[in-house]
Image (cartoon, rainbow, N blue to C red):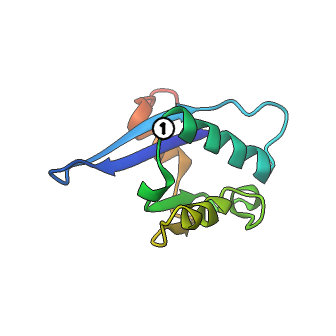
Amino acid sequence: MAIFIRGSDVNLKTNEELLEAIYMHNTTTGADIFDALMEVLKKYKLPLDKFVCLATDGSPTMNDITKGVVKLKEMCKQHGNNNFEHFLYILHKQVLCIKVLNIRHVL
């Protein structure tokens, strides 16, 4: 699983980087993906009250309301972030990876 992060600095300059690529061993249930994402957020000390949105590819494991990564929206609300949004189907994995990893020759 590839986790990208995008943010703005004090001058509103936008930056986007590959935060981490995670190998999902044996299973990719919504709960497993959610747990892996939360581990990365803890590792980099990223506070949930600063998140603005989550964009996913629309797969059921990513978008399950009770177990999937969309559960992050509810957790953000619990941390006082009521403006968190979720966007479906706007990502094309190849575009993200090619842009950041510079692997056009592989594809």
Image quadrant in which you'd find residue 38: top right
Which residue sits furthest left? 11
Residue 40: image location, x then y, percent: 58, 37
In front: 57, or 29?
29
In the picture, which quadrant includes the N terminus? Answer: top right
Image quadrant in which you'd find residue 22: top right
With 20 as the anchor, is 67 left or right in this view? right
In front: 69, or 56?
69
Q: Residue at x 53, y 59 (%)?
A: 55
Image quadrant in which you'd find residue 56: bottom right
With 78 as the anchor, is 96 left or right in this view? left
Residue 48: image location, x then y, percent: 50, 54
Secondary element under disc 1, as helix, strand or loop, is loop
With 105 as the anchor, is 76 left or right in this view? right
Which residue sits furthest right? 26
Q: Which residue is drawn at 65% across and 62% down?
A: 70
With 84 as the anchor, is 66 left or right in this view? right
In front: 11, or 81?
81
Above or below, comparing residue 83 to residue 70 in the picture: below
Q: Is the residue marked by circle 1 packed among few (<14), some (14-19), or many (20+) residues within 10 Å?
A: few
Badge 1 is on which residue?
45
Q: Residue at x 62, y 58 (%)?
A: 72
- At label 1, the amino acid type is Lys
Residue 57: image location, x then y, percent: 61, 58
